Amino acid sequence: MSSMIEVKSVQKSFGRLKVINDCSFNIEKGSITGMIGPNGAGKSTIFNIIAGTIPLDTGNIILDGEDVTNQTANALFGKGLLRTFQIAHEFSHMTALENLMMVPPRQLGENLFNAWFQPGKVARQETKNRRKALEVIDYIGLDHVKNELAGNLSGGQKKLLELGRTMMTDSKVVLLDEVAAGVNRTLLKGLTDNILRMNRDLGVTFLVIEHDMDMIAKLCDPVIVLAQGSVMVEGKIEDIQNNPQVIEAYFGSTDAA
Ligand SMILES: Nc1ncnc2c1ncn2[C@@H]1O[C@H](COP(=O)(O)OP(=O)(O)O)[C@@H](O)[C@H]1O
Ligand SMILES: [Mg+2]
């Protein structure tokens, strides 16, 4: 197996607070890699560094063999790396289907060129885009609400729609930061199933940061435990859950228990 993402000796401080401390790990191609750790461990920070939304201080991020350290989120998107975003306020007045159709294509420059010089090609592209959006909405099980305004969807349906948006782009790797928060059990299963299917059918690599241990157990291999800004241990969930060091990090001293 080869690496989709390599995180190499990353350091990051906010002011005098060192949040990421000599952090290194690999995300293998085709894996669904989980990340857990106590609150404040630095999970969202390393996530945002990988996604290109926070610059690192020192270290390197390698994406599919290419050094992409401190490239912008837009540049990384063009290279097939995508994080989910909450459906922004302005999109809540568009239908679920329209939300999928307006996801920007990966090669924006080329399409802008086409818009000026090849209007016919753009029209064909739009038809293709609509067809793809219909496929995606069916795939994620939201066909029955495709014409609902996104703002009227339930919290869980919005999460599925966010995942659907990642599918419009043919991304190679998708980053998810606590997407299960506040999602009911039924839709959580839908979300989990769809991540598994995207991984198996489409070969998408995932990094999943999650509080929900059931979801981590169903989806992720390996699981990385982050504590105080660096990797404490990495392995299969069964081993992680029984690791005394991990139990200590989560629940404090085992002697006191
Ligand atoms: N923009 C920021 N400015 C200052 N401190 C921050 C910032 N973002 C996060 N932190 C601090 O960095 C630490 C790690 O935060 P975070 O990465 O959100 O942890 P986690 O996602 O594991 O809960 C926390 O102590 C948090 O308060
Ligand atoms: Mg977080």
Image (spheres, rainbow, N blue to C red):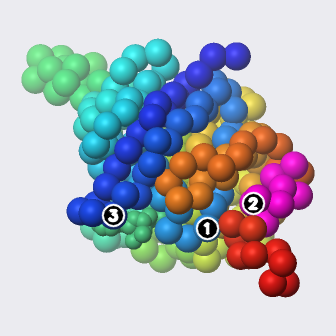
- Name the main secondary structure of what is drawn in magenta: helix
Does the segment drawn in magenta span residue 177? no
Residue 99's image quarter?
bottom left
Residue 68 place in picture, x, y as percent: 34, 26
The answer to whether mark 1 is within 8 Å of ligand 1 is yes
Q: Residue at x 43, y 25 (%)?
A: 62
Does the segment drawn in magenta span residue 243? yes
Identify the residue position indicated by label 2 in the image. 246
Identify the residue position indicated by label 1 in the image. 38
Q: Residue at x 55, y 25 (%)?
A: 4
Q: Are marks 1 and 3 in contact (CB under 8 Å)?
A: no
Say what amino acid the circle numbered 1 marks.
Answer: Pro
Q: Residues within 10 Å of mark 2 (few under 14, many from 20)?
A: many
Q: Residue at x 31, y 43 (%)?
A: 56
> Of residues 140 and 179, which is closer to you in this image?
179
Where, quadrant-wise, is the C terminus in this rendering?
Answer: bottom right
Asked if 100 appears above or below 149 in the picture, the reply is above
| Residue interval drawn in magenta | 239-247
C-alpha separation, residue under disc 2 versus residue under disc 1: 10 Å
Identify the residue position indicated by label 3 in the image. 17
